[in-house]
Image (tube, rainbow, N blue to C red):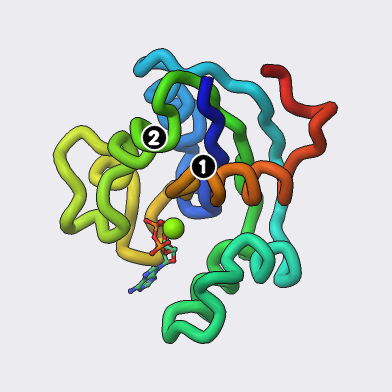
């Protein structure tokens, strides 16, 4: 069983889409292995988004991601990393396919409702930014 790190971003939390989004993960047969509500600070955001430091969108991304509570989750299931990325859709909701979470709930290419790990390596790294092993029920 593969695990992946998902964040429901401040825009989707603020708009009360948390329940509908979680329902979509469970709807494709994924199981919640860990979950918490938290507000990121700049340090946490810089660790999570380390590969993006220096990009033109980085500073506004950090401002956005630290602007309010988020839901952090570990989702578990067969091919979870790929299947969650497919369910989320493209980064820019204007390019996201119908029925994807970003098509349904994202505002723009920054305020795009959700984050998901993009590889087994990033999943392992990102899961342990947000969760201790004792908090993961796999
Ligand atoms: P994804 O979240 O789809 O894996 P990236 O890893 O490329 O996308 O980027 C991380 C996050 O940074 C995006 O989800 C989005 O919030 C923000 N971002 C990326 N590219 C842009 C951009 N061109 N303009 C504004 N925000 C961006
Ligand atoms: Mg990414």
Q: CA distance from mark 1 to mark 2?
A: 13 Å
Q: Residue at x 63, y 60 (%)?
A: 48
Q: Considering depth in this image, is 35 or 48 the residue closer to the camera?
A: 48
For the residues bearing labels 1 and 2, Cβ distance under 8 angstroms: no
In the image, residue 110 lies at what x, y percent?
39, 66
> Residue 124's image quarter?
top right
Residue drawn at x 52%, y 50% is 9
Task: Report x, y in % for residue 35.
Answer: 67, 30
On the image, which quarter does residue 73 sit in?
Answer: top right
- Quadrant holding ligand 2? bottom left
Q: Is residue 135 left or right of residue 66?
A: right
Q: Which residue is mark 1?
A: 120
Spot the residue most to the right: 134
In the rendered image, residue 80, in percent from the top left (x then y), is placed at: 44, 28
Image quadrant holding the C terminus, namely: top right
Relative placement, left or right, of 59 versus 68 is left
Q: Which SS class for mark 1?
A: helix
Task: Classify residue 84 by image quadrant.
Answer: top left
Q: Residues within 10 Å of mark 2 (few under 14, many from 20)?
A: many
Q: Residue at x 68, y 27 (%)?
A: 34
* Secondary element type, mark 2: helix
Reading the image, the residue beneath label 2 is: 84
Q: Is residue 93 above or below residue 17?
A: below
Q: Is residue 134 above or below residue 51?
A: above
Residue 7, which numbered label? Answer: none
In the displayed structure, 102 sits above or below 50; it is above
Residue 71, percent from left and from top: 61, 40
* Residue shown at 53% from the left, 40% from the top: 6
Say whether mark 1 is within 8 Å of ligand 2. Answer: no
Side of 10 relative to 108 (left or right): right
Along the polypeptide, which appears first: circle 1 or circle 2?
A: 2
Asked if residue 7 can be seen in this view, the reply is: no
């Amino acid at each position: 069983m593969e695990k992946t790190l998902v964040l429901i971003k401040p825009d989707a939390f603020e708009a009360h889409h948390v329940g509908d989004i979680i329902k979509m993960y469970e709807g494709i047969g994924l199981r919640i292995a860990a979950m918490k509500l938290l507000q990121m600070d700049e340090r946490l955001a810089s660790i999570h988004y380390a590969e993006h430091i220096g990009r033109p969108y980085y500073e506004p991304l950090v401002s956005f991601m630290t602007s309010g509570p988020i839901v952090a989750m570990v989702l578990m299931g067969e091919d979870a990393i790929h299947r969650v990325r497919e369910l989320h859709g493209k980064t820019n909701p204007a390019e996201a396919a119908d029925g994807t979470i970003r098509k349904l709930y994202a505002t723009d290419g920054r305020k795009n409702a959700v984050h998901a790990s993009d590889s087994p390596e990033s999943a392992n790294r990102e899961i342990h930014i947000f969760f201790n092993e004792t908090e993961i029920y796999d």
